[in-house]
Amino acid sequence: MRKAGQSALVLWAAFTAAYVLLQLLPGDAILIKFQNPELGLSPEQIAQIREYYGTEGPAAYLHTLLGFLRGDFGYSIDTGTPVVERLAEALPETAKLAGLGFALAVVLAVAIAFASGHRLLAWLREVPSLFVAVPVFWVGILLIQLFSFRLKLVPVIGGTEAQQLILPVLTLAVPICAPIAQVLARGIDQVSTQPFVQVVAAKGASRRWILWRHVARNAMLPTLTMAGLTFGELIAGSVITETVFGRNGVGRLTEQAVSAQDTPVLLAVVVLAATVFVLVNLIVDLLFPILDPRLR
Amino acid sequence: MATRVTAAVLLAVTGLLAGCGGTTEPTAKVAAAGEPVVGGTLTYLEHQPPTCLYLPAAGFYPNGGLLNQLTDKLTWQNPKTLEIEPWIATKWEINKDATEYTFHLRDGVTFSDGSPLDASAVAANFDVYGKGSTELKLPPAEFVNNYESSEVVDPKTVTFHFDKPSPGFLQGTSVIGAGLVSKKTIGLPYEQQCQLKNVIGSGPFTVADQIVDKEIDLKARKDYNWAPPSSKHQGRAYLDEIKIIVTPEDNVRVGALTSGQADFVRYVQAYDEQTVKGAGFTLYAEPTRGVNNGLYLRPSNSILSDIKVRRALQKGTDVKEVVDTLFTPSYPAATSVLSHLAQGYVDLSKELVFDPEGAGALLDEAGWKRGADGIREKDGAKLQLGVFVSLPQPLSKQTLELVAQQWAKLGVKLEVRPGDAGTLAVDIKNAEKTAVSHSMVGRADQDVIKSQFHSKNRDVILSKDGKLDQLLEEESALAVPAERNAKVAEIQRYLVKQGYAIPLFEEPQVYGGAPNVHGVAFEAVGRPSFYSVWKS
């Protein structure tokens, strides 16, 4: 119950902060759309349009907030379509991309962390630092150039749904897997030096048993927190990935809304992102006691 | 009240979009590759998704590239001669003072919903394009002036009446925004007409499928049989299908083309041209025949109010360096305010010679002295001017930064600001903050110069110059083409003499095509027509 209250507070704060910040930006969607010098509209006419859209003052804030509470996100000023409609189109696309990207990132991270524990593969330790350093944009372009344009393994134009997902998912997984791998590898190192590991080893447990049963389980806790935190990265990454690959989705929608300062769309995106963030953290919190009996 | 405001706004929006470009239709590029083959799919990569598809707003290139395949026009402007030729109208009569136009229509033309393209449909279209509709929130179109009414004489004859001479109307019936749509479409409110699914035309292709902002699939109309009479190709389009795919990333478009995943792409950047040509692909650099890409100096800015300063900046800008460093031969250096292919063009290259010494002398004369940091000063104020990066213009940022370097040598600081939409919207009409505008307009008509400079149109220089407005109005009211051209020449001279314009280059629309794609045609301002395209 307290958790739910906190979550509601976080959502309200995200909404309000976004609302205030958007108001503080120079210009607004109406100005951008209508006060183009090429239109020749007078400031009075613009003021009338603004009144028509009802986008100013504390009353507008309350109106928008109440709308959100009812699930009515209003209309995109840029396109005139209901925001809900635009989100409904974009969300499944991004969910697919982000979900698969995250899953692949976890697989990669675990593989890197464990493999780098081996003497011969210790160089893998450096890989996450590299992955963190390269921009998503560049990774996407590189993958397209290599796998699609040179090796012609997978098309970026046309192709099946699965073909269209391969490279974007890989692009997104690269920066996400890096911090997870780093934290997991460090966790494994730390846990391995703890006395209880020596005790277990002294009792005759095999290396593999120790690693999976004891070390990994303990190293998993900070990793899980980190995985939850990468959610922000996931959203940022999908904006770029969707633009590079020309995919529809929340990322591309956000990018378009930002350039048009389309407040209703941006508010909806912020609230949506905050909601998912809250949920992800809730899930992480709930998973902790399952993994660690001490927290029960 | 609200409706009235909205209508006014929409009117203005359309003015903007239609002004982005403006005219005509296809002539097939000669492709020496044997007999045309019927069938196949053309994959066309667009740079941006289309916006509102209400016909008068079709000037925006992503819109035009789509609507050009879906609609036909009353007349066809030959992009080579710029003459107006028959299309849906087989012939026409115009009275002496250009206040009455009668068009005789072709027989048997239908829209893709089966309804006839007859006199009443044409009248319904032009009633909206000419006057707009407050009720449906439809703005009138920029290319129709002084429209009064239509009169359906018989099912194949329609007469238009104007309350004042409207010499530009005949050409106006050929522009991209004058595409004819079914009565059902033209009767819809603005928001509905904006949507692709509601656009019912009589063109060689129809919409088969659409994923908003991502992909549009067109298919050929098998019963299409009314191409412009001067087209060699008659009957249905050769292609079966066109897939228009929005691909915002420049090097993905070019890479997809050269790796065989796409057949045709729009917006090849100057630095990618060699990649396209080097791979044996075809580069199409189509002229836009209007006001050149250039820097437009605002006399209402307190520093630029001095003609000496404006002339100094004009002399001190090395256009050749800009074109040679950043661009390719597809971007010819400007020799006047207008493109050399524009109507009424006059060669002013002698007036536009790079002369840094002359520029320095003028600035000295104007009282601007070099300060300790190399930037000129006068009465404690620095010679500093602001300009926004113009997103629609190719390599605008790089162009402006190079010009800023050139001006720095003169002792002038040009502050190049990134064009985030909000700040731009707030500051663009403020001559103190935005002293210089980087822009162009494409349109194959003398009126293009009025669009760019008149204080009631785009007003890029915020001139408040009564004489300039008067010259522009005189130009648009002249019925005799030769007189109109002479007036356009006078205006170009005036703009250069006043130091209002620093023309840079003639901005093209650059496309790339696969070697097996033949018959691509372009209307007068560079929008593609795929009617006669075939793949070998």
Image (cartoon, helix red, strand yellow):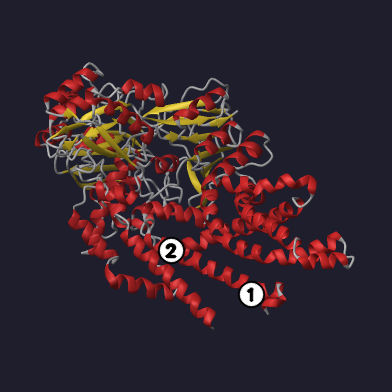
Residue A4, can we see it? yes
The structure residue drawn at horizontal position 75% and vertical position 61%, both measured from the top left corner, is A193
Specify the farthest residue to the left. Answer: B466
Specify the farthest residue to the right. Answer: A204
The structure residue drawn at horizontal position 51% and vertical position 31%, both measured from the top left corner, is B533
Identified by mark 1, the residue type is Leu
- What label does residue A286 carry, if any? 1
* Left or right of residue B120: residue B534: right
- What label does residue A83 carry, if any? 2
B38 vs A51: above or below: above
Specify the farthest residue to the front. Answer: A195
The one nearer the camera, B419 or B475, is B419
The structure residue drawn at horizontal position 44% and vertical position 51%, both measured from the top left corner, is B196
Element type at mark 2: helix
Q: Chain of mark 1?
A: A
Specify the farthest residue to the bottom. Answer: A1
Location of residue B112 in the rendering, given as x and y in whole percent from the top left corner: 46, 48
* Left or right of residue A60: residue A254: right
Q: Quadrant of residue B529?
A: top left
Q: Quadrant of the C terminus of chain A?
A: bottom right
Evaluate whether label 1 is on the same chain as label 2: yes
How many neighbours does mark 1 have within 10 angstroms: few (below 14), some (14-19), or many (20 or more)? few
Element type at mark 1: helix
B468 vs A81: above or below: above
Task: Look at the numbered discs 1 and 2 and tell me whether their residues touch, using CB distance below 8 Å.
Answer: no
